[in-house]
Image (spheres, grey):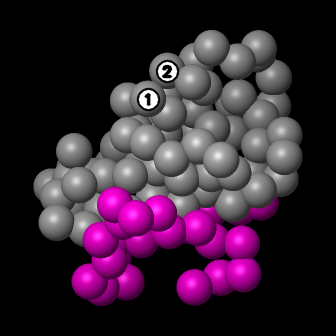
Amino acid sequence: IAPRMVLRERAIVRETRDVLCIGPIGSRQDFLTVTFGDGVLQVTTGCFSSTLADFEAEVNGKPDGYAKDEYLAVIELIKLRAKERGAT
């Protein structure tokens, strides 16, 4: 696991394809970690750890700017990977 990559208690990782780690990203220049294990998708960055829907709502509530644009682009990648992995 990368030094700043965070896995929370609900994260299930059985193989390398179960994890997506992107960063540094956003205004805090932190890492965003997504796990897809056993069909459960979890997004973690900084103190945030929840579902993709919750993360997307959080991002959409932020002011426009480069950090928001980065996160919106990553959300599309996460959706693509989730579809491929059968995760929700």
Q: Is residue 45 left or right of residue 86?
A: right
Q: Position of residue 33 (x, y in %)?
A: 54, 61
Q: Which mark is residue 27?
A: none
The N terminus lies in which quarter of the figure?
Answer: bottom right
Name the residue: 71% across, 28% down. Answer: 68
Taking the view exactly as shown, the residue that stands out farthest to the front is 9
Amino acid under disc 1:
Asp
Q: Quadrant of residue 71?
A: top right
Residue tagged by mark 1? 54
Q: Which residues are magenta?
A: 1-24
Could you classify mark 1 by the number of other residues whose Cα lies within 10 Å: few (under 14), some (14-19), or many (20 or more)? some
Vertical order, 22 against 28 (above or below): below
Q: Residue at x 59, y 43 (%)?
A: 48
Return the mark for residue 57: 2
Q: Position of residue 51 (x, y in %)?
A: 38, 40
Position above or below: 68 against 10: above
Residue 70, located in which quarter of the rendered image? top right
The reply, left or right, for residue 30 in relation to residue 58 is right
Near-viewer residue (8 or 26)? 8
User: Residue sitting at 51 percent across and 47 percent down?
Assistant: 49
Does 15 appear in magenta? Answer: yes
In which quarter of the view is residue 12 placed? bottom left
* Rendered view: 44 above or below 59: below
Amino acid type, residue under disc 2 in the picture: Ala
Task: Assess whether residue 87 is covered by the magenta stretch.
Answer: no
Q: Magenta part mainly helix, strand or loop?
A: loop
User: In what quadrant of the picture does the C terminus appear?
Assistant: top left
Q: Tell whether label 2 touches label 1 (CB within 8 Å).
A: yes
Q: Which element carries disc 1, helix, strand or loop?
A: helix
Question: Could you tell me residue 45's position as x and y percent?
Answer: 63, 51
As helix, strand or loop, the secondary structure at mark 2 comes to helix
Is residue 45 in sight in this rendering? yes
